[in-house]
Image (cartoon, grey):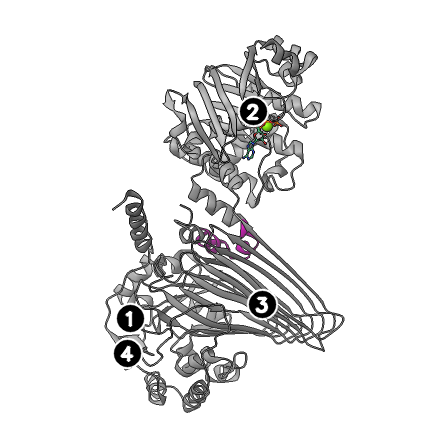
Amino acid sequence: MSASSETLQTLRSLARESYKYGFITEIDAEAAPPGLTEDTVRFISAKKEEPAWLLEWRLAAFRAWCGMAQPDWAKLQLTPIDYQAATYYSAPRQSAGPKSIDEVDPELLRTYEKLGIPLREREILAGVAVDAVFDSISVATTFKEQLGELGIIFCSMGEAVREHPELVRKYLGTVVPQNDNFFAALNSAVFSDGSFAYVPPGVRCPMELSTYFRINAAKTGQFERTLLIADAGAYVSYLEGCTAPQRDENQLHAAVVELIAHEDAQVKYSTVQNWYPGDAEGRGGIYNFVTKRGACRGARSKISWTQVETGSAITWKYPSCVLEGDHSVGEFYSVAITNNRQQADTGTKMIHIGSDTRSTIVSKGISAGRGQNTYRGLVRVQPRARGARNHTQCDSLLIGERCGAHTVPYIEVRNPSARVEHEATASRISEEQLFYCRQRGLTTEDAISLIVNGFCREVLKELPMEFAVEAQKLLAVSLEGSVG
Amino acid sequence: MLEVTNLHARLNDGREILRGIDLSVKAGEVHAIMGPNGSGKSTLAAVLAGREGYEVSEGSVSYLGRDLLVMPADERAREGLFLAFQYPIEIPGVNNMYFLRTALNAQRRHRGEPELDAGQFLRIVRARLKLLDIGEDLLQRAVNVGFSGGEKKRNEILQMAMLEPRLAILDETDSGLDIDALKLVARGVNEQRSPERAIVVITHYQRLLDYVEPDRVHVLQRGRIIQSGDKALAVELERRGYGAAEEAA
Ligand SMILES: Nc1ncnc2c1ncn2[C@@H]1O[C@H](COP(=O)(O)OP(=O)(O)OP(=O)(O)O)[C@@H](O)[C@H]1O
Ligand SMILES: [Mg+2]
C-alpha cells in the first residue's frame, strides 16, 4: 500500500469514528411489527390509549398518504425508502410514565449525560425545562410545576392528548394539515410523541423550553409531532436539539412542527440538528424530512425560526411562516453544513397574506468534501398583502473543489405595493484568509472553523447564548477533515 | 536568530523571484530592507512566513537554530515569527478582539502557558491600545473589514504588540500612514525592541528609519541583496534612488 493511500485510509477510519454520539443504549423496547397498514395506525393509537377522534384523524392521514407519492422535486439523490420495512412504534418498556426524574431508568439518564445533557444538573442549575424524547416516549419533563404556576403547559404530546384534549383538538393540524405533503401525512398517521406547549394570554415564558430528540432503536423511524401555541401577547422561546446514534442503515425521520402565534404573540424556535450524517463514503446516516410551519394568526404577531443543520445524510426541510395577521413578522435564519456526502435541500416559505407583513430570510450554506447544499425558498405575496416587505440574503461558502452550492429562489408577488429583495453571494475560503490566520498561530482547522463561524455570525447571534456556544463547536466538528 | 543562505524561490509558473538571498539577523537587531517595486521584498517575507505557492529551489533558512523551511506556517508563527502584512486580510464576521485572543491563546498553549480568559485579555489589550492610541471600537469590529488603510496597519502593530514575537517582519507597515500614525507605529516597534528580539522592516521610506534606528540596511534588487550598509545607506538611497545603488553593486 502506498503511503498516500495509507494516509487516506487512516483519515477515513478517523472520519468514521469521529461521530461522538454513536452509542446505543440497551433497553428493552416494545415495538410494533414492521410495516405500515391501517392496523399499524390502530396499534399505535391503542398503545397510546387515544380518544376516538384522534384515531380517526390518524386514519384520515393514512388514507391520504396512501394516495401520495414521495416528492422528487428536491435536489437530492437518495436510495428508495422501503416504508414497509420500517418500524413505526418503539417505546422503552416501562410501566407508567415517570412521575419525577428519580423514577427515570438510570440507563436513560446516562445516555443523556453522554449527550451532554445531564437532566439533574439542567434542572438545578440551568433553568432550562427539558422535555426529553427518547425514541417515541417522553421520559422526563422538568420544571413543569414552576411553569404551571404561570398557566404554561409544557408536556409531551401524548400527555397533552390526555390532559388537554380540547387544546390539542383545536390546534392540531391547523397549520400543517394531514394531507399537506407526503411526509406530513405519514407523520400524522403514525406520530409517536413530541412536545406540546401552550402559553396563555399575556404571559412571557420565563425560561427557554427545550427538547432533545434522540433516535435509538434500530430501524425505527422517528415521527415527532410538536405543537406550540402562544396566545395573545404571549412569548415563548423553544430550543430543539437532536442527536442519533451511529447506524449503518439509513433511518427515516419525518417530524412535523406547528407553531401558532396569536395577536401580539411571539414564538422563537431554535434548532441545532446534528444527527448522524453517515460516514465519509455516504453509508448510513439519517434521512431527515421535516415539515415545520408557523402561523402568525394575529395582528403584530411574530414567528422566528433559527436553525443550525450540521447532521443527517439527507436534509429536506423548509421551516415556513404564514403571515396572516396584519403587521405580522416572519424570520428565518439558517446555517446548513454539508460535508463528505451529505446533501441538504433546505430553505423557507414566507407567505404574506395580511397587510404590512414583513419577512426576513438569512441563509448561510456551507459545502465541503462532496457535500451538496441547496437553498430553496419561496416568497409569496398574496393580493391582500398591501405594503408587504421581504428581504432575503442567501450566502454560500465552498470549501474544496468537489462540493456544490445551489440557490433556488421562487418569488411570487401579487400585490404591486410589495417590496421583495433577494441578495445572493457565493464565495470560497480564500487561501489568503487561511494564511493570515495561520500566520497568527492558528492551525488550519482552527482557521477554517473561525472563518466559517464568522460567515455564520448573523445566524448564530440569533441563537440563545448557551446554544450558540454548542453550535459553534458543532460547526468545527462537522468540518473536521474538510481540508487536507 | 535568522540565517538566510543563498535562498532561491520561484512561483508555480517557474518564474524565479528570489535569486540567491543572504541575510543574517541577530537577536536584538533591527534590519531594514529597501528596494524598488516588484524586487521581491514581500516574496521574501512570504517565503519566510511559510506561505504556500512558492517553491524554494535552493538555499536554506535557519531560525533559532532550526530549519525554518520544513515548518508549517502556523508552527512558525507559534515559534515566534510574526509577519505584519503589506495588505492585511479581511475576515468578515470575526470579531477583531476574539481573533486576537484566539491567536494569543494558540501561541500561549504552544508555549505551555495558561490561556487568558476574556477579562485578563481585556486588561492587557487595553494597555497596548493606549500605547498605540487605538480606539477600543476597533476591537469590536470584524477583522480588517471596513478598516481604513491606516487602521489596518495599526491593527497589525497591535497584533504584534500582543503576540510579542521573537522575530517580527513588518512589510511596509509605514506606507500610507500620516505622520502621527507613523510615529505611533514607530513607538510600537521601538517598544518591541529588546535583546531577545529581532525586527526586519521592509520600507520604501527613510522617514520611518528616523524613528526606528536600524542596525543594518539592505537593498533588494531583482531578487538579490545588492548592497548592505548602516543607516547612512538609507539616506543616500533616498537622495539618489536605486539606480545609483545598482551601479555601485
Ligand atoms: N503569488 C504570486 N503570483 C504571481 N506573481 C507574484 C506572486 N508573488 C510575487 N509575484 C511577483 O513577483 C515579483 C515580486 O513581488 P513582491 O510582491 O515580492 O515585490 P515587492 O518587492 O514586495 O514590491 P512592492 O514594493 O511593490 O511591494 C512581482 O513581479 C510580483 O508580481
Ligand atoms: Mg511588497
In which of the image's four quarters is ligand 1 placed? top right
Q: Secondary structure at mark 1?
A: loop
> x%, y% of residue A206?
51, 63
On the same chain, marks 1 and 2? The answer is no
Q: Is residue B100 left or right of residue A105?
A: right
Query: Within 8 Å of ligand 1, the CB of disc 4?
Result: no
Q: Is residue A438 left or right of residue A7?
A: right
Q: Residue at x 68, y 76 (%)?
A: A382
Label 3, label 1: how far apart the Cα atoms are: 34 Å
Do callouts 4 and 2 point to residues on the same chain?
no
Does ligand 1 reach within 8 Å of label 2's beta carbon? yes
Nearest to N terminus: mark 1 or mark 4: 4
Q: Give a yes or no on whether discs 2 and 3 share a subunit.
A: no
Number of the front mark, 4 or 2: 2
Extreme residue toward the front, this view: B14
Disc 1 chain ID: A
**Which residue is label 4 attached to?**
A31
Q: Which residue range is magenta in the image?
A: A455-472
Mark nearest the camera among 3 and 1 is 3
Residue type pointed to by label 4:
Ala
Secondary element at image label 2: helix
Q: Is residue A214 above or below residue A430?
A: below
State the residue position of label 2: B41
Residue at image coords 51%, 66%:
A346
Count the marks.
4
In the rendered structure, does residue B54 fall within the stretch colored magenta?
Answer: no
Specify few, some or many for label 1: CA neighbours under 10 Å numbering under 14, 14-19, or 20 or more.
some
Instruction: Please identify the dominant SS of the magenta region.
Output: helix
